[in-house]
């Protein structure tokens, strides 16, 4: 399986398919991440808030996949504003790595705090403790504030995304700013029994979940499905061997409720 990537600047490439780990803890998190790496995922998404960084790190080490072949993201909870350095130290220690590939501000911190936190993120990147830094759940105005104050854009904005949330102007707004759009909750935001998805899936002899994931890839949007079910973990990564037509892409775009 070949997973396309997007360049984040310099030599750093971010695979468009990652494995989400929210609400998976303890041995379930270890088992799921190990299975994901076996199935070919080379991008893992965790967060301080998920409480599973130690299991994600242990599964990564035990998988035998070299560290430099896996893109690793974690996130700072907004209530840790002012404790950025200690929070990243704890993440790196739990994950058992010297640096993460991407460190995100999980949600916009309260009034007046977004820019100071962003300056700490830029410092962490300069120190090599995060190869790239970005944000999550930010609006385009929030991104413009960071760029206006520091001259540095987030590499990535991770937001809730799926066919029902599709907005061409959100895609183009990120592209114009050179910020990679990363979607989360691709299935929770989608009715996988939808007629359009079911028909397109049957035409390609795949399941609707893969149609949703393939739709992200063909838009150049990063997607990070989560599953604890071994068969689904493997199947969700089987995204080559079929291509959605332009017409099918438009039909899926039109599932948007916005
Ligand atoms: N930045 C943020 O604020 C934020 C917020 C939410 C999520 N995220 C990230 O995004 C990741 C993904 O989002 P998510 O966990 O909210 O939800 P999701 O990936 O949209 O959906 C997960 C659900 O879909 C089910 N599922 C997985 N594969 C399936 C398939 N092939 N067919 C049918 N159902 C399937 C899973 O069930 P089983 O597990 O039982 O198989 C689970 O119930 C998270 O894990 C996290 O890493 C980030």
Image: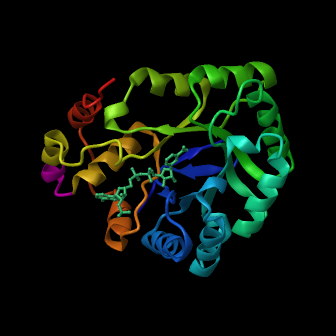
Left or right: 158 with respect to 74?
A: left
Look at the image and tell me in which quarter the C terminus lies. Answer: top left
The percent coordinates of residue 186 (x first, y second) are 38, 46
Left or right: 185 with respect to 123?
A: left
The percent coordinates of residue 38 (x first, y second) are 47, 75
The percent coordinates of residue 64 (x first, y second) are 60, 80
The kind of secondary structure the magenta stretch mainly shows is: helix
The percent coordinates of residue 40 (x first, y second) are 46, 68
Q: Is any atom of residue 176 visible in this view?
A: yes
Residue pictured at 39% horizontal, 25% vertical: 167
Tell which of 218 and 213 is nearer to you.
213
Look at the image and tell me in which quarter the N terminus lies. Answer: bottom left
Q: Which residues are magenta?
A: 201-206
Residue pictured at 72% horizontal, 42% vertical: 79
Residue pictured at 15% horizontal, 47% vertical: 198
Tell which of 209 and 71 is nearer to you.
209
* Quarter of the view holding residue 179: top right
Residue pictured at 45% horizontal, 39% vertical: 220
Left or right: 136 with respect to 100?
A: left
Question: Is 2 part of what is drawn in magenta?
Answer: no
The tally of labels here is 0
Quadrant of the rendered image holding ligand 1: bottom left
* Quarter of the view holding residue 165: top left
Q: Is residue 122 above or below residue 145?
A: below
Left or right: 234 with respect to 101?
A: left
Q: Is any atom of residue 47 visible in this view?
A: no
Question: Is 202 part of what is drawn in magenta?
Answer: yes
Coloration mode: rainbow
Q: Is residue 257 above or below residue 22?
A: above
Q: Is residue 96 above or below residue 8?
A: below
């Amino acid at each position: 399986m070949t997973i396309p990537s997007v360049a984040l600047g310099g030599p750093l490439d971010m695979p468009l398919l990652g494995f989400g780990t929210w609400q998976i803890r303890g041995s379930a998190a270890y088992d799921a991440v190990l299975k994901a790496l076996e199935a070919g995922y080379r991008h893992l998404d965790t967060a301080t808030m998920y409480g599973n960084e130690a299991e994600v790190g242990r599964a990564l080490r035990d998988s035998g996949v070299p560290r430099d072949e896996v893109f690793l993201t974690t996130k700072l909870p907004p209530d840790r504003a002012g404790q950025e350095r200690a929070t990243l130290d704890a993440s790196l220690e739990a994950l058992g790595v010297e640096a993460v590939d991407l460190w995100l501000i999980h949600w916009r911190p309260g009034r007046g705090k977004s820019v100071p936190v962003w300056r700490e993120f830029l410092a962490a990147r300069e120190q090599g403790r995060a190869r790239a830094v970005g944000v999550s759940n930010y609006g385009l105005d929030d991104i413009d504030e960071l760029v206006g104050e520091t001259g540095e854009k987030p590499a990535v904005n991770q937001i809730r995304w799926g066919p029902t949330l599709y907005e061409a102007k959100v895609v183009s707004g990120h592209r114009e700013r050179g910020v990679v759009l990363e979607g989360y909750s691709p299935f929770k935001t989608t009715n996988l029994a939808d007629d359009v998805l079911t028909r397109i899936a049957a035409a390609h002899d795949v399941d609707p979940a893969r149609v949703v994931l393939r739709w992200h890839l063909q838009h150049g949007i990063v997607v990070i499905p989560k599953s604890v079910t071994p068969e689904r973990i493997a199947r969700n990564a089987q995204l080559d061997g079929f291509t959605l037509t332009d017409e099918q892409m438009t039909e899926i775009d039109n599932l948007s409720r916005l």
